[in-house]
């Protein structure tokens, strides 16, 4: 009777083959990958929206600050008295460089870079079906 009960236990035991285990592992990996793709989609979409909004505000501020710094006066001097600028070109270049709002220009270039990077990742995801790590 003991032999028959052990035999019955082995028959009733649910034995998972390697194929079933592989399918479970693959399904789990696929679910995690899909979840990661959704999260990264939202991250890239939100970063592109935020960088575009920030870029608009930075450009507006840059447009306001350029006339206040005298940058346009230096550019008009370039057009009107070009012969004097050839003589004093070093001083002119230093004055033009000092009149530029460097912080706003740097921030605008950084935001453009973030915007283009996010758009690139979104487009790659759309056409390839997943994100590239590199």
Image (cartoon, rainbow, N blue to C red):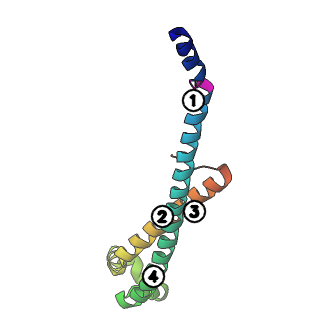
According to the picture, the residue beneath numbered tag 2 turns out to be 114
Q: Is residue 28 left or right of residue 73?
A: right
According to the picture, the residue beneath numbered tag 3 turns out to be 119
| Residue 53 visible in image | yes
Range of magenta residues: 13-19
- Mark 1–mark 2 Cα distance, whole angstroms, equals 42 Å
Whichever of labels 2 and 3 marks the residue nearer the N terminus, that label is 2
* CB atoms of marks 4 and 3 within 8 Å: no
* CB atoms of marks 3 and 1 within 8 Å: no
Give the residue displayed 41% in from the left and 76% down from the top: 86
- Mark 3–mark 1 Cα distance, whole angstroms, equals 39 Å
Whichever of labels 4 and 3 marks the residue nearer the N terminus, that label is 4
Horizontal and vertical percent position of residue 68: 37, 90
Residue furthest to the front: 1
Whichever of labels 4 and 2 marks the residue nearer the N terminus, that label is 4
According to the picture, the residue beneath numbered tag 1 turns out to be 21
Helix, strand or loop at disc 2?
helix
Horizontal and vertical percent position of residue 133: 51, 46
Asked whether 64 falls inside the magenta stretch, the response is: no
- Mark 4–mark 1 Cα distance, whole angstroms, equals 54 Å
Give the residue displayed 36% in from the left and 79% down from the top: 101
According to the picture, the residue beneath numbered tag 4 turns out to be 57
Give the residue displayed 42% in from the left and 89% down from the top: 64
């Amino acid at each position: 009777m003991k032999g028959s009960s052990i035999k019955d236990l082995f028959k009733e035991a649910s034995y998972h083959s390697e194929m079933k285990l592989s399918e479970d592992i693959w399904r789990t990996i696929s679910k995690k990958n899909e979840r990661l793709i959704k999260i990264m989609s939202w991250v890239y979409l939100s970063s592109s929206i935020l960088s575009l909004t920030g870029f608009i505000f930075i450009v507006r501020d840059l447009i306001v600050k350029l006339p206040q710094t005298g940058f346009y006066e230096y550019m008009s001097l370039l057009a009107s008295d070009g012969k004097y600028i050839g003589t004093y070109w070093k001083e002119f270049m230093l004055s033009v460089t000092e009149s530029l709002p460097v912080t706003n220009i740097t921030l605008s270039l950084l935001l453009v870079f973030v915007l283009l990077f996010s758009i690139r990742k979104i487009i790659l995801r759309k056409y390839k079906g997943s994100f590239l790590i590199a």
